[in-house]
């Protein structure tokens, strides 16, 4: 996150948001303001409502109460937000470039412009040379990078990532975490990142939002939001890294 981002208008704002189904509230009182290039990781125990919150922030789920605001896309050839899922969700009958272009279809772009807009994010994730390959010829990590490229191609103001590395092996996951650190520097998008991995949250985020239940049968809430005041480079080796991971673990364990 850059210092100048705090002087910009928010790209996402949630105020006193409560969420639930069939009259039952599962998450209450959520506040979040996100500026360009900020990265917020959301953590908490399984079933606490992390993915439900992500859907509400993206406008896919109406809150029971409160308000979520995402400003409109800057231009007709971009989108306000995009999402990276746990699985790449690539169409096997479309080549890599065709999968990335999928999100661009329906925008006011020529065929040549769609091609250019697809190749740029593929280059960002290191797959421009794979543009004409079929998805089944790629590794799992490469397929997920195609999913990230597809989400970036629409030049979103907010990028939602729902446990994007959870299905990958440890080595691939660590490689993509580092690639995401580099990618942050090359996009203006703000990022909301859901993960079960506390180390991953502290490694990547500017802030870690912890969801938890104070009491049984009560809606979950944001129990604490922690600032990650460490440089992105070599963060794992920073003396404050392990203590902060332990602090987040303790907060989750107590809620």
Image (tube, rainbow, N blue to C red):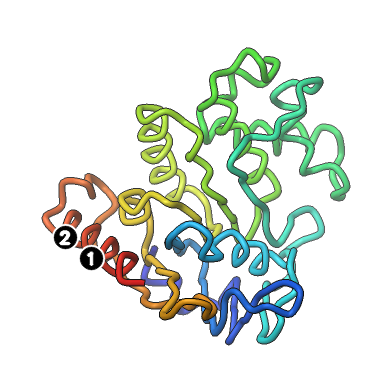
Quadrant in the picture for residue 180? top left
Residue contact at pointers 1 and 2, CB within 8 angstroms: yes
Residue depicted at x 72% and y 26%:
97
Image spot of residue 99 (x, y percent): 74, 31
Q: Quadrant of the C terminus?
A: bottom left
Q: Is residue 130 left or right of residue 243?
A: right
Relative depth, front residue between 107 and 161 = 161
Q: Which residue is mark 2?
A: 243
Tell me where residue 66 appears, x and y as whole percent. Answer: 66, 86
Nearest the eye: 153 or 139: 139
User: Which secondary structure lies at badge 1?
Assistant: helix
On the image, numbered disc 1 is attached to which residue? 247
Percent x, y of residue 205: 38, 58
In the rendered view, does 5 fall on the left or right side of 82?
A: left
Q: The N terminus is located in which quarter?
A: bottom left
Name the outermost residue toward the left. Answer: 239
Instruction: Look at 65% across and 76% down and name the residue there.
Output: 19
Mark 1 to mark 2 CA distance (whole Å): 6 Å
- The 10 Å Cα crowd at callout 1, few under 14, some 14 to 19, many 20 or more, is few
Mark 2 burial class by Cα count in 10 Å: few <14, some 14-19, many 20+: few
Q: Residue at x 28, y 61 (%)?
A: 249
> Image height check: is 65 above or below 154?
below
- Answer with the quarter of the image where residue 160 lies: bottom right
Outermost residue, front side: 216
The residue depicted at 39 percent of the width and 78 percent of the height is 223
Picture coordinates of residue 219, whole percent (x, y)? 54, 78
């Amino acid at each position: 996150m850059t210092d100048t981002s705090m002087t910009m208008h928010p790209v996402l704002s949630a105020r006193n948001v409560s969420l639930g189904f069939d009259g039952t509230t599962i998450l209450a009182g959520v506040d979040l303001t996100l500026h360009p290039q900020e990265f917020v990781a959301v953590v908490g125990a399984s079933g606490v409502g992390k993915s439900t919150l992500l859907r509400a922030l993206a406008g896919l789920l109406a809150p029971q109460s409160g308000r979520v605001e995402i400003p409109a896309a800057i231009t007709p050839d971009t989108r306000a937000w995009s999402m990276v899922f746990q699985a790449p969700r690539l169409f096997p009958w479309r080549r890599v470039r065709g999968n990335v272009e999928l999100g661009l279809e329906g925008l006011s772009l020529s065929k040549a412009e769609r091609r250019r807009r697809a190749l740029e994010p593929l280059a960002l994730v290191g797959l421009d040379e794979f543009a004409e390959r079929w998805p089944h010829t790629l590794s799992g990590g490469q397929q997920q990078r195609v999913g990230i490229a597809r989400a970036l191609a629409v030049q979103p103001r907010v990028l939602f990532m729902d446990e994007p590395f959870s299905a990958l092996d440890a080595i691939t996951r660590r490689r993509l975490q580092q690639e995401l650190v580099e990618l942050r520097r090359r996009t203006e998008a703000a990022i909301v990142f859901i993960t079960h991995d506390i180390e991953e949250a502290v490694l990547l985020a500017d802030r870690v939002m912890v969801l938890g239940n104070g009491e049984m049968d009560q809606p979950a809430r944001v129990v604490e939001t922690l600032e990650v005041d460490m440089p992105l480079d070599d963060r794992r080796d920073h003396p404050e890294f392990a203590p902060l991971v332990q602090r987040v673990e303790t907060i989750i364990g107590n809620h």
